[in-house]
Amino acid sequence: MNNDPKIFVMGDLHGAYKALIECLKRAHFDYENDTLIQLGDVVDGNPQVYECVEELMKIKNLIAIKGNHDAWFQKFLENDFHPQLWNYGGIATLESYLNHCQPLGKIIKTAKGIKPL
């Protein structure tokens, strides 16, 4: 079997974690040696966006290109609401991350400029 590093190209995951895992498995993708070029649109559509992002982050040689859905979600995170976000699976993306949030507990307001001890 040839162990030379290979280059794979994938796009439009849209939160389809099971499909991502199945593709990598069938390709015998080597997380340490192979390269994955992700052509964008990791977010929106399916409810496992968080899992997709976490899995992609495990890949040593990942080249990620921002897709239009990824750009819309980035604008949302930067408090620049993009109306198309909600039309194309933005809610599923948010819910994917909310499932992994920890409660904050008590929040203490302090005066601006006071440095913590």
Image (spheres, rainbow, N blue to C red):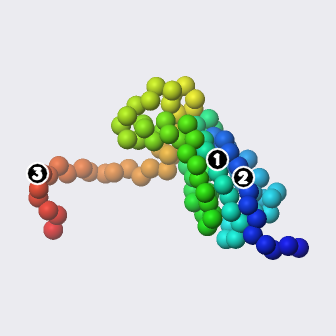
For the residues marked 1 and 3, what is the alpha-carbon distance in whole angstroms? 45 Å
Tell me, yes or no, if residue 53 can be seen here.
yes
Amino acid type at mark 3: Ala
* Residue 84, placed above or below residue 21: above
Most extreme residue toward the right, as rendered?
Answer: 1
In depth, the one of 69 and 49 nearer the eye is 69
Residue at the (49%, 50%) spot, across then down? 100
Which badge, 2 or 3, is on the more N-terminal residue?
2
Circles 1 and 3 in contact, beta carbons < 8 Å: no
Which quarter of the image is occupied by the C terminus? bottom left
Residue at the (71%, 66%) spot, across then down? 34
Give percent across and percent down for residue 101.
44, 50
Q: Which mark is residue 39?
A: 1
Q: Which mark is residue 9?
A: 2
Give percent across and percent down for residue 84.
51, 26
Amino acid type at mark 1: Leu
Tell me, yes or no, if residue 94 can be seen here.
no
Q: Residues within 10 Å of mark 1 (few under 14, many from 20)?
A: some
Q: Secondary structure at mark 1?
A: loop
For the residues marked 2 and 3, what is the alpha-carbon distance in whole angstroms? 50 Å
Q: Secondary structure at mark 3?
A: loop
* Residue 72, placed above or below residue 25: above
Circles 1 and 2 in contact, beta carbons < 8 Å: yes
For the residues marked 1 and 2, what is the alpha-carbon distance in whole angstroms? 7 Å
Residue at the (46%, 25%) spot, across then down? 83
Question: Label 3 belongs to which residue?
Answer: 111
Labels 1, 3: front one: 1
Which badge, 1 or 2, is on the more N-terminal residue?
2
